[in-house]
Amino acid sequence: MSKPIQLSGKMLAFSRIKILSDSMSDIQTALGELVNSNKATTGIPVVIDSKSMLALDTLIDFMWSIGIQPIGVIDGILNAQAKQLRLAIFPADGKRIERLAPKTDSIEQPIQQAQQTDTSPITSSIHTQMVRSGQSIHHFGGDLTVVGGVNHGAEVITDNSLHIYSHGLGRLVAGATGDKHARIFCQKFNPTLVSVAGTYCLREDIPSQMIDQAVQVSYDEVKGLVFSLINS
């Protein structure tokens, strides 16, 4: 008999739980065994990937009860339930996001750290075209600036700060490798997901007064994500 679930790699800071059974009792048993045998799974944010129709609210409640934090589903059969539960919907394997390279030359700049100078350069990149649905920019080693905007279904990711001089409607990620000083600056802020230094927030949890405004997002050790209006 095949296993009813399978835990696989990461999407950004998320792990994927692949549901391989339509038996809720088998799934719950397997999830309990997974958590008991691997304490590292406790508290991790996960995305649910299922080809079977399940009572998603029941599964979500059980996951939370054992310390797993479900944040969304893979695009498919559970979409309608996910929307009702206000969960994120991520691209399916057959619709993997197209990885783009920035459209302009990178700009090298030195970085100075407190009490010592590191002469190794970081590389900041500027993308001058719109990032469309199904497209992605991953930039590591410096700031990323997007001039053309980020549409729904697109994502932009950098390990330093992210600057968007237009609308930001997709998934916006800064400090992807854990930089707590990274920030997001967006001229018209309305993302489906925003993350800084591994701490994320879905669209429904963003303060309503920030939507469609010029916004800065930073990370605070105590408060988590901090949203503030630019020039207010």
Image (spheres, rainbow, N blue to C red):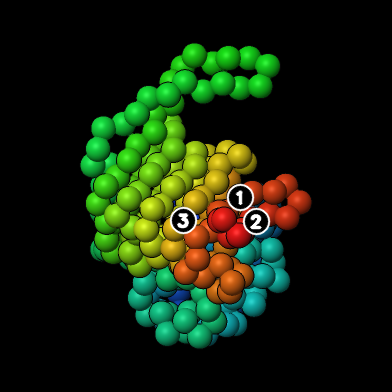
Label 1 packing within 10 angstroms: few (<14), some (14-19), many (20+): many
Numbered disc in front, either 3 or 2: 3
- Give the left or right position of residue 156, taking residue 69 as reference: left
Secondary structure at badge 3 equals strand
**Label of residue 51 in the image:** none
In the picture of the structure, the residue carrying the numbered disc 1 is 218
Please say whether residue 93 is visible from this viewpoint.
no
Amino acid type shown at disc 2: Val
Q: CA distance from mark 3 to mark 2?
A: 14 Å
Secondary structure at badge 1 equals strand
- Give the left or right position of residue 29, taking residue 75 as reference: right
Write the residue at 58% across / 74% down: 208
For the C terminus, the image quarter is bottom right
Sooner in the amino-acid sequence: mark 1 or mark 3: 3
Asked whether 213 or 175 is in front, the reply is: 213
Amino acid type shown at disc 1: Ser
Write the residue at 42% across / 85% down: 80
Sooner in the amino-acid sequence: mark 1 or mark 2: 1
Q: Residue furthest front?
A: 231
**Image coords of residue 10 (percent x, y):** 47, 51
In the picture of the structure, the residue carrying the numbered disc 2 is 226
Please say whether residue 223 is visible from this viewpoint.
yes
Q: Residue furthest right?
A: 222
**Label of residue 186 in the image:** 3
- Give the left or right position of residue 89, taking residue 57 as reference: left
**Image coords of residue 74 (percent x, y):** 40, 68
| Residue contact between numbered discs 1 and 2, judged by CB atoms under 8 Å | yes
Numbered disc in front, either 1 or 3: 3
Q: CA distance from mark 1 to mark 2?
A: 5 Å
**Image coords of residue 31 (percent x, y):** 60, 65
Label 2 packing within 10 angstroms: few (<14), some (14-19), many (20+): few
Asked whether 161 or 90 is in front, the reply is: 161
